[in-house]
Image: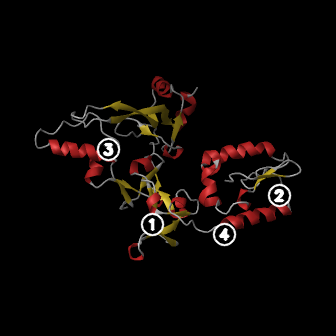
Amino acid sequence: ALTYAIAFSDDLTAKDVTRRYTRTYAAKVLKTRVDVSPWGKEWLTNVFNLFQYRGSATNNNNNMGGKNKSDRDIIEDHELARKEAAEPMPRNIQDFRSHPVYALERHLRRNEIIHPKREVGKISSSSSSTSASNKTSESIFRRQDVHICRTADQWFRLGREINEQEQPVKRLPPPLRRQHQQQQQQRKKQDSPPPPPPLTDDNDDEEHDQEEGGKPLYLEHQTKPYTPPPIPTSGHPIPRNAYGNLDIYTPSMVPARGYHSAHPLSAHAAKILGVDAVDAVTGFSFSGVGGGGSGGGSGGGMRRYGKPLITGAIIYAPHRAAVEA
Protein backbone atom coordinates (compact mmCIF):
# COMPACT_ATOMS: atom_id res chain seq x y z
CA ALA A 1 0.00 0.00 0.00
CA LEU A 2 1.14 3.55 -0.72
CA THR A 3 2.50 5.28 2.38
CA TYR A 4 4.54 8.22 1.07
CA ALA A 5 4.42 10.08 -2.22
CA ILE A 6 6.99 12.87 -2.36
CA ALA A 7 7.19 15.17 -5.38
CA PHE A 8 10.42 17.03 -6.19
CA SER A 9 10.59 20.33 -8.05
CA ASP A 10 13.30 21.35 -10.49
CA ASP A 11 15.15 23.15 -7.70
CA LEU A 12 15.13 19.91 -5.60
CA THR A 13 12.61 21.17 -3.05
CA ALA A 14 10.01 18.62 -2.00
CA LYS A 15 6.26 18.40 -1.31
CA ASP A 16 4.22 15.62 0.28
CA VAL A 17 1.48 14.74 -2.24
CA THR A 18 0.39 11.42 -0.72
CA ARG A 19 -3.20 12.62 -0.35
CA ARG A 20 -3.46 12.96 -4.12
CA TYR A 21 -2.89 9.23 -4.71
CA THR A 22 -4.95 7.61 -1.94
CA ARG A 23 -8.63 7.56 -1.08
CA THR A 24 -8.19 6.56 2.57
CA TYR A 25 -5.42 8.89 3.77
CA ALA A 26 -6.96 9.68 7.18
CA ALA A 27 -8.55 6.28 7.79
CA LYS A 28 -5.66 3.99 6.85
CA VAL A 29 -2.54 5.59 5.38
CA LEU A 30 -1.84 8.15 8.12
CA LYS A 31 -1.72 5.39 10.77
CA THR A 32 1.22 3.75 8.97
CA ARG A 33 3.28 6.93 8.64
CA VAL A 34 5.91 8.21 11.02
CA ASP A 35 4.16 11.59 11.30
CA VAL A 36 1.11 10.05 12.99
CA SER A 37 2.64 11.15 16.31
CA PRO A 38 3.86 14.66 17.25
CA TRP A 39 7.49 13.58 17.61
CA GLY A 40 7.32 11.71 14.30
CA LYS A 41 5.91 14.76 12.55
CA GLU A 42 8.73 16.87 13.95
CA TRP A 43 11.33 14.30 12.86
CA LEU A 44 9.92 14.11 9.32
CA THR A 45 9.87 17.89 9.07
CA ASN A 46 13.53 18.05 10.13
CA VAL A 47 14.43 15.48 7.49
CA PHE A 48 12.74 17.47 4.73
CA ASN A 49 14.41 20.64 5.93
CA LEU A 50 17.43 19.24 4.10
CA PHE A 51 15.47 19.95 0.92
CA GLN A 52 14.39 23.40 2.01
CA TYR A 53 14.94 26.43 -0.19
CA ARG A 54 17.59 28.59 1.51
CA GLY A 55 15.81 31.88 0.93
CA SER A 56 12.64 30.97 2.86
CA ALA A 57 11.51 30.65 6.45
CA THR A 58 8.27 28.89 5.48
CA ASN A 59 7.92 25.33 6.77
CA ASN A 60 4.81 23.17 6.77
CA ASN A 61 3.84 19.57 6.23
CA ASN A 62 2.38 20.01 2.73
CA ASN A 63 5.30 21.95 1.30
CA MET A 64 8.12 20.17 3.07
CA GLY A 65 10.75 21.94 1.01
CA GLY A 66 9.60 25.19 2.60
CA LYS A 67 10.29 27.41 -0.45
CA ASN A 68 8.37 30.64 -1.02
CA LYS A 69 5.00 29.58 -2.41
CA SER A 70 4.22 30.37 -6.01
CA ASP A 71 0.69 30.54 -7.39
CA ARG A 72 1.04 26.94 -8.51
CA ASP A 73 2.00 25.85 -4.98
CA ILE A 74 -0.97 27.67 -3.45
CA ILE A 75 -3.39 26.08 -5.91
CA GLU A 76 -1.87 22.65 -5.29
CA ASP A 77 -2.12 23.03 -1.51
CA HIS A 78 -5.81 23.93 -1.81
CA GLU A 79 -6.34 20.91 -4.04
CA LEU A 80 -4.75 18.54 -1.51
CA ALA A 81 -6.65 20.07 1.40
CA ARG A 82 -9.92 19.82 -0.51
CA LYS A 83 -9.26 16.17 -1.35
CA GLU A 84 -8.54 15.34 2.30
CA ALA A 85 -11.67 17.18 3.48
CA ALA A 86 -13.79 15.28 0.96
CA GLU A 87 -12.66 11.88 2.27
CA PRO A 88 -15.78 10.00 3.43
CA MET A 89 -16.32 8.51 6.87
CA PRO A 90 -14.78 5.09 7.46
CA ARG A 91 -17.08 2.14 6.85
CA ASN A 92 -15.81 -0.17 9.58
CA ILE A 93 -15.19 0.15 13.31
CA GLN A 94 -11.43 -0.43 13.19
CA ASP A 95 -10.74 2.50 10.86
CA PHE A 96 -12.17 4.91 13.43
CA ARG A 97 -9.33 4.12 15.86
CA SER A 98 -6.92 7.09 15.96
CA HIS A 99 -8.78 8.72 13.06
CA PRO A 100 -7.80 12.42 12.89
CA VAL A 101 -11.36 13.64 12.16
CA TYR A 102 -13.85 11.16 13.65
CA ALA A 103 -13.98 9.18 16.90
CA LEU A 104 -16.03 6.44 18.58
CA GLU A 105 -16.65 6.32 22.31
CA ARG A 106 -15.38 2.74 22.51
CA HIS A 107 -11.89 3.87 21.41
CA LEU A 108 -11.44 6.54 24.08
CA ARG A 109 -8.61 6.22 26.57
CA ARG A 110 -9.35 6.03 30.28
CA ASN A 111 -8.65 9.75 30.71
CA GLU A 112 -10.54 10.96 27.62
CA ILE A 113 -14.09 12.20 27.28
CA ILE A 114 -16.28 13.57 24.49
CA HIS A 115 -17.56 17.05 25.31
CA PRO A 116 -19.94 18.22 24.07
CA LYS A 117 -21.52 15.08 22.63
CA ARG A 118 -22.41 16.31 19.14
CA GLU A 119 -23.25 13.28 17.05
CA VAL A 120 -22.32 13.54 13.36
CA GLY A 121 -23.38 10.08 12.24
CA LYS A 122 -23.86 6.42 13.14
CA ILE A 123 -22.18 3.17 12.22
CA SER A 124 -23.40 -0.37 12.63
CA SER A 125 -21.58 -2.24 15.38
CA SER A 126 -23.03 -5.65 14.49
CA SER A 127 -21.64 -8.20 12.07
CA SER A 128 -23.10 -8.58 8.61
CA SER A 129 -24.62 -11.94 9.59
CA THR A 130 -26.73 -10.36 12.33
CA SER A 131 -30.42 -10.08 11.55
CA ALA A 132 -31.83 -6.62 10.86
CA SER A 133 -33.91 -6.68 14.07
CA ASN A 134 -30.83 -7.33 16.26
CA LYS A 135 -28.46 -4.87 14.65
CA THR A 136 -27.10 -2.07 16.85
CA SER A 137 -25.40 1.17 15.94
CA GLU A 138 -22.84 3.46 17.55
CA SER A 139 -22.70 7.23 17.48
CA ILE A 140 -19.86 8.94 15.61
CA PHE A 141 -18.31 12.12 17.02
CA ARG A 142 -15.71 14.60 15.83
CA ARG A 143 -12.15 14.17 17.09
CA GLN A 144 -12.02 17.85 18.00
CA ASP A 145 -14.60 17.16 20.73
CA VAL A 146 -12.40 14.55 22.41
CA HIS A 147 -10.63 16.08 25.41
CA ILE A 148 -8.19 14.87 28.04
CA CYS A 149 -9.47 15.11 31.60
CA ARG A 150 -7.20 15.04 34.65
CA THR A 151 -7.37 14.68 38.41
CA ALA A 152 -7.10 17.73 40.65
CA ASP A 153 -3.51 16.76 41.50
CA GLN A 154 -2.56 16.42 37.83
CA TRP A 155 -4.04 19.85 37.06
CA PHE A 156 -2.17 21.28 40.03
CA ARG A 157 1.09 19.99 38.57
CA LEU A 158 0.23 21.98 35.44
CA GLY A 159 -0.23 25.12 37.51
CA ARG A 160 -4.03 25.02 37.68
CA GLU A 161 -6.66 24.38 40.36
CA ILE A 162 -10.28 23.24 40.23
CA ASN A 163 -12.96 25.93 40.34
CA GLU A 164 -15.28 25.92 43.32
CA GLN A 165 -18.37 23.71 43.16
CA GLU A 166 -17.22 21.95 40.00
CA GLN A 167 -18.47 18.41 39.52
CA PRO A 168 -16.19 15.78 37.91
CA VAL A 169 -17.03 14.95 34.31
CA LYS A 170 -15.79 11.40 34.76
CA ARG A 171 -14.57 9.02 37.44
CA LEU A 172 -11.61 6.80 36.72
CA PRO A 173 -12.15 3.26 38.07
CA PRO A 174 -9.17 1.49 39.65
CA PRO A 175 -7.17 -0.91 37.43
CA LEU A 176 -8.46 -4.48 37.22
CA ARG A 177 -5.41 -5.69 39.14
CA ARG A 178 -6.31 -3.57 42.15
CA GLN A 179 -9.96 -4.58 41.89
CA HIS A 180 -8.87 -8.23 42.09
CA GLN A 181 -6.69 -7.43 45.13
CA GLN A 182 -9.60 -5.71 46.83
CA GLN A 183 -11.84 -8.72 46.24
CA GLN A 184 -9.20 -11.01 47.76
CA GLN A 185 -8.88 -8.78 50.80
CA GLN A 186 -12.65 -8.69 51.28
CA ARG A 187 -12.79 -12.50 51.27
CA LYS A 188 -10.16 -12.61 54.05
CA LYS A 189 -11.84 -10.04 56.28
CA GLN A 190 -14.14 -12.61 57.86
CA ASP A 191 -11.26 -14.93 58.81
CA SER A 192 -8.55 -12.45 59.78
CA PRO A 193 -8.31 -8.93 61.25
CA PRO A 194 -7.82 -6.07 58.78
CA PRO A 195 -4.17 -5.32 57.91
CA PRO A 196 -2.50 -2.24 59.39
CA PRO A 197 -2.44 0.86 57.17
CA PRO A 198 0.66 1.18 54.93
CA LEU A 199 3.47 3.51 55.90
CA THR A 200 3.12 5.38 52.61
CA ASP A 201 -0.02 6.31 50.75
CA ASP A 202 -0.78 4.90 47.32
CA ASN A 203 -1.01 7.26 44.38
CA ASP A 204 -3.52 10.09 44.81
CA ASP A 205 -5.40 8.63 47.79
CA GLU A 206 -6.63 5.60 45.90
CA GLU A 207 -8.57 4.15 48.82
CA HIS A 208 -10.58 7.35 49.25
CA ASP A 209 -11.19 7.63 45.52
CA GLN A 210 -12.38 4.03 45.29
CA GLU A 211 -14.89 4.63 48.07
CA GLU A 212 -16.28 7.54 46.06
CA GLY A 213 -16.52 5.45 42.88
CA GLY A 214 -13.14 6.23 41.33
CA LYS A 215 -10.78 9.13 40.85
CA PRO A 216 -12.64 12.31 39.89
CA LEU A 217 -11.50 13.84 36.59
CA TYR A 218 -12.00 17.40 35.35
CA LEU A 219 -11.68 19.28 32.06
CA GLU A 220 -9.53 22.35 31.56
CA HIS A 221 -12.48 24.74 31.43
CA GLN A 222 -13.31 23.61 34.99
CA THR A 223 -9.97 24.92 36.23
CA LYS A 224 -8.23 28.25 36.67
CA PRO A 225 -4.57 29.27 37.02
CA TYR A 226 -3.27 28.58 40.51
CA THR A 227 -2.34 31.73 42.45
CA PRO A 228 0.03 31.02 45.36
CA PRO A 229 -0.02 33.15 48.52
CA PRO A 230 2.27 36.17 48.04
CA ILE A 231 5.45 36.77 50.02
CA PRO A 232 5.04 39.55 52.62
CA THR A 233 6.65 42.89 51.78
CA SER A 234 9.06 42.28 54.65
CA GLY A 235 10.35 39.16 52.87
CA HIS A 236 9.71 36.94 55.89
CA PRO A 237 8.28 34.40 56.31
CA ILE A 238 7.94 32.88 52.85
CA PRO A 239 4.72 30.81 52.65
CA ARG A 240 5.26 27.05 52.84
CA ASN A 241 3.13 23.98 52.31
CA ALA A 242 2.53 21.27 54.91
CA TYR A 243 5.89 19.66 54.04
CA GLY A 244 7.92 22.84 54.55
CA ASN A 245 8.62 23.48 50.86
CA LEU A 246 6.89 24.99 47.80
CA ASP A 247 5.53 23.25 44.70
CA ILE A 248 6.91 25.05 41.62
CA TYR A 249 5.81 22.90 38.68
CA THR A 250 5.36 25.90 36.38
CA PRO A 251 6.83 29.45 36.47
CA SER A 252 3.36 30.83 37.31
CA MET A 253 3.48 29.01 40.66
CA VAL A 254 6.26 31.27 41.97
CA PRO A 255 4.60 33.51 44.59
CA ALA A 256 4.36 37.25 44.07
CA ARG A 257 7.50 39.17 45.18
CA GLY A 258 9.38 35.88 45.00
CA TYR A 259 12.17 34.58 42.79
CA HIS A 260 13.08 30.99 41.91
CA SER A 261 16.82 30.55 42.18
CA ALA A 262 17.60 27.22 40.54
CA HIS A 263 21.16 26.95 41.88
CA PRO A 264 21.49 23.88 44.16
CA LEU A 265 23.23 25.96 46.86
CA SER A 266 20.65 28.75 46.93
CA ALA A 267 19.10 27.66 50.23
CA HIS A 268 22.56 27.31 51.82
CA ALA A 269 23.59 30.77 50.63
CA ALA A 270 20.37 32.27 52.00
CA LYS A 271 21.01 30.62 55.35
CA ILE A 272 24.50 32.15 55.52
CA LEU A 273 23.02 35.57 54.74
CA GLY A 274 20.30 35.11 57.34
CA VAL A 275 17.42 35.51 54.88
CA ASP A 276 14.45 33.21 54.40
CA ALA A 277 14.42 30.58 51.63
CA VAL A 278 12.17 27.62 50.84
CA ASP A 279 13.09 24.51 48.85
CA ALA A 280 11.42 24.44 45.42
CA VAL A 281 9.86 21.10 44.45
CA THR A 282 9.71 20.96 40.65
CA GLY A 283 8.64 17.33 40.21
CA PHE A 284 8.82 13.79 41.52
CA SER A 285 10.94 10.76 40.76
CA PHE A 286 8.93 7.54 41.05
CA SER A 287 10.37 4.12 41.70
CA GLY A 288 8.59 0.77 42.05
CA VAL A 289 9.09 -1.39 45.12
CA GLY A 290 7.78 -4.93 45.31
CA GLY A 291 5.07 -5.48 47.85
CA GLY A 292 4.38 -8.53 49.96
CA GLY A 293 3.26 -11.83 48.57
CA SER A 294 -0.30 -12.70 47.77
CA GLY A 295 -0.85 -13.45 51.43
CA GLY A 296 0.70 -10.21 52.62
CA GLY A 297 -1.26 -7.39 54.17
CA SER A 298 -0.71 -4.96 51.26
CA GLY A 299 -2.11 -7.31 48.67
CA GLY A 300 1.19 -7.87 46.81
CA GLY A 301 2.22 -6.31 43.52
CA MET A 302 4.28 -3.24 42.80
CA ARG A 303 3.86 -0.01 44.75
CA ARG A 304 5.25 3.31 43.57
CA TYR A 305 7.10 5.66 45.89
CA GLY A 306 7.64 9.27 44.87
CA LYS A 307 10.74 11.22 45.81
CA PRO A 308 10.48 15.01 45.46
CA LEU A 309 12.94 16.69 43.10
CA ILE A 310 14.38 19.82 44.72
CA THR A 311 15.58 22.45 42.24
CA GLY A 312 17.01 25.40 44.11
CA ALA A 313 14.90 27.56 46.37
CA ILE A 314 12.32 30.32 46.45
CA ILE A 315 13.68 33.57 47.89
CA TYR A 316 12.46 37.12 48.35
CA ALA A 317 13.10 38.88 45.01
CA PRO A 318 15.12 41.81 46.45
CA HIS A 319 17.53 39.23 47.96
CA ARG A 320 18.34 37.72 44.56
CA ALA A 321 21.57 39.61 43.95
CA ALA A 322 22.97 38.76 47.37
CA VAL A 323 22.02 35.08 47.25
CA GLU A 324 23.39 34.51 43.74
CA ALA A 325 26.54 36.58 44.20
- Residue located 49% across and 32% down the image: 311
Mark 3 or 1 closer to N-term? 1
Which amino acid type corresponds to the residue marked 4 in the rendered image?
Answer: Ala
The image position of residue 175, as x and y in percent, is 34, 47
In this view, which residue lies farthest toward the right?
Answer: 10
Mark 2 or 3 closer to N-term? 2
Q: Is residue 189 left or right of residue 276?
A: left
- Identify the element where label 3 is drawn: helix
Mark 2 or 1 closer to N-term? 2
Q: Is residue 250 left or right of residue 41?
A: left
Q: Nearer the viewer, residue 39 or 90?
A: 90
- Give the spatial CA distance, label 4 vs label 3: 44 Å
Which amino acid type corresponds to the residue marked 1 in the rendered image?
Answer: Ser
Mark 4 or 3 closer to N-term? 4
- Give the spatial CA distance, label 3 vs label 1: 32 Å
Which amino acid type corresponds to the residue marked 3 in the rendered image?
Answer: Arg
Which residue is the site of mark 3? 177
